[in-house]
Image: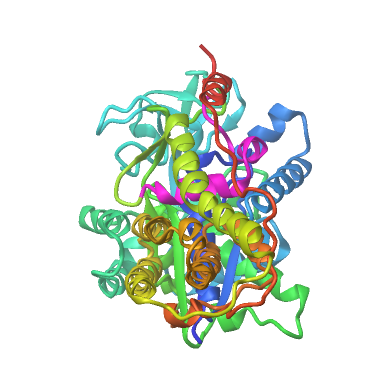
Amino acid sequence: MSKILVTSALPYINGVPHLGHMVGCLLPSDTYARFMRMMGNEVLYICGTDEHGTTSEVGALKAGMDVQAYCDMNHNRHAQTYKDFNLSFDFFGRTSTEENKEMTYHIFEQLDKNGFIAEKTVKQVYSVDDKMFLADRYIVGTCPYCGYDKARGDQCENCTKVLEPTELIDARSAVSGSKNLEVRETKHLFLNLPKIEDKLEAWLKTKEPFWPDVAYTIAKKWLKEGLQERCITRDLKWGFPVNKKGYEDKVFYVWFDAPIGYIGITKQWEEEKPQERNWKDWWLNPQNVRHVEFMGKDNVPYHSITFPATLLGTGENWTQVDFLKGMSYLTYEGGKFSKSEKRGIFAEDAVKEFPADYWRYWLMSNAPESSDSSFSWDLFAGAVNKDLNGVLGNFVSRVLKMTASKLGDKVPEGGENSKAENELIDVLQKRVNDYIKYMEEMEFRKALGELRAIWVEGNNYISAEEPWAVIKTDEQRAKVILRNCINLIRVYALLSAPIMPETSQKILDKLYTQPTLIKDFDVKKEMNFFKGGESFEVGDMLFERITPERVEELKTKYAGAK
């Protein structure tokens, strides 16, 4: 049994994520964590809300709330949304706690002691109308490299180029839209990345060719362009006050303390059951821990360069990321999701429209792994109607109803498998092997393709063997066919569990059985799990079709302002 540490990008506290955020890091990390547990591994799946920075201050200001109360409210919204999506975190914490403050202070002190912290007087943008220094991400303008007109002052999300706010063309405040900006001098602390660059590059080479292209290419691009010192303090009130003389009136930059939050959150997890858990087993001088991270490509530079460099600079044996699964973007009906324009569907609304498994299946089947993907209501309805209702749901309902009506509500007994069953088992074993291989490699679209193909094999089998006709002349043969189909339903439930946990449990409940591990999955053995005589219930249909009228209604509802 291996120890697998799973983390995803920490969702920012300001509002709840849309579908692009869900598929960019949260759903893939959950799917992988669930799968690894089913493979018999010891898994620690950690996440939490990222709470510091100007975004929280501005959000609270607009809401007329105290910043702490604002963060408390939104943390609860996030937690409820992820619960509704059946995300299986071992612990969902937050970055603004004393535990994370303690970790941040320790890591900063080690960096400072080792000579990796530089002091500089810099020019920073001050908004006269807003009466505040603006955090980089709250200055927007045109990117000088690609011309994107909504680039932020820290990074252009279009070309991923790291920027300084003063580089932006036609800069303006994202808080008020004011262009009445001044550049003022202020003193800050910097992480001296150039001094760590050699260590970082040597470390990154150990990841080639194992990281996916989205992550590795971005990391190599940063190194090729040459690392620059990165400011790790800000002129704000909301954040951890800097623990260095002369800087007590400043706070740590959110991008410094947020990744450290993985460790701080694990410390929070430990403190729930301190006699059973030890955060150091996972993060400091760990034994046999494999750390897998999931995030959108805009977050990749910080987790492939800045955070690893931060940990390397301490000189301590911290757990570093072993595999970084970078994801591209999901667009909405050919454009961008927009909270301000109410365009696109956000996670907390999605689960009000349809059960979580509908979304989990579609999003993981269309995960933007190597390039951007696009959500549309037509595609979503098509997948639900064809794959979930038409292939999986129809097979389960058809088999159980037929068996109950023709033979009663117990798994049929007697008879021996024929050539047809042996051939089916051989085909299924190959597909299951491929499914498990793709899941282990985090090639989710390929894995979902195999899963659907496994469902189709069952439909092909029952269509070819025609138990409804065979039972008229050879009841014993019909029993064999239907018993194999019921065993196949259980196989479907086990393999579908990482992607659709609620549906999987519903199927197992129909069969009065429980989940099991899928490590070393032997299809021949699993197809003989029910030997005959076991009870089952038909129950309700697993899925409902989405009508064309409903599709048009949803398109209008989430189209945004005209």
Q: Residue at x 26, y 57 (%)?
A: 213
**Visible residue check, residue 192:** no
Q: Is residue 561 above or below residue 138?
A: above
* Residue 481 sits inside the magenta stretch: no
Determine the residue positioned at 32% across, 28% down: 148
- For image coordinates 67% across by 62% down, the residue present is 510
Residue 271: percent from left, percent from top:
75, 74
Identify the image quadrant of residue 450: bottom left
Q: Is residue 285 above or below residue 228?
A: below
Q: Is residue 171 above or below residue 426?
A: above
Count how many numbered circles sit on residues in the image.
Answer: 0
- Which of 150/292 is in front? 292
Farthest front residue? 473
**Camera-side residue: 506 or 101?**
506
Quarter of the figure with residue 58? top right
Residue 447 image offset from top left, x and y in percent:
38, 61
Q: Residue 261 location in percent, x, y?
A: 59, 62
Confirm whether the magenta stretch covers residue 364.
Answer: yes
Residue at point 51%, 28% (across, down): 338
Q: Position of residue 311 (x, y in %)?
A: 46, 71
> Which residue in the rendered view is the most extreme toward the left?
224
> What is the magenta segment's predominant secondary structure?
helix
Q: Is residue 264 left or right of residue 461?
A: right
**Left or right placement of residue 48 versus residue 167 in this view:** right
Drawn side of residue 81 relative to residue 181, left or right? right
Q: Residue furthest top?
A: 562
> Visible in this render: residue 132?
yes
The magenta stretch spans which residues?
343-368
- Which color scheme is applied? rainbow
Q: Nearer the viewer, residue 381 or 367?
A: 381
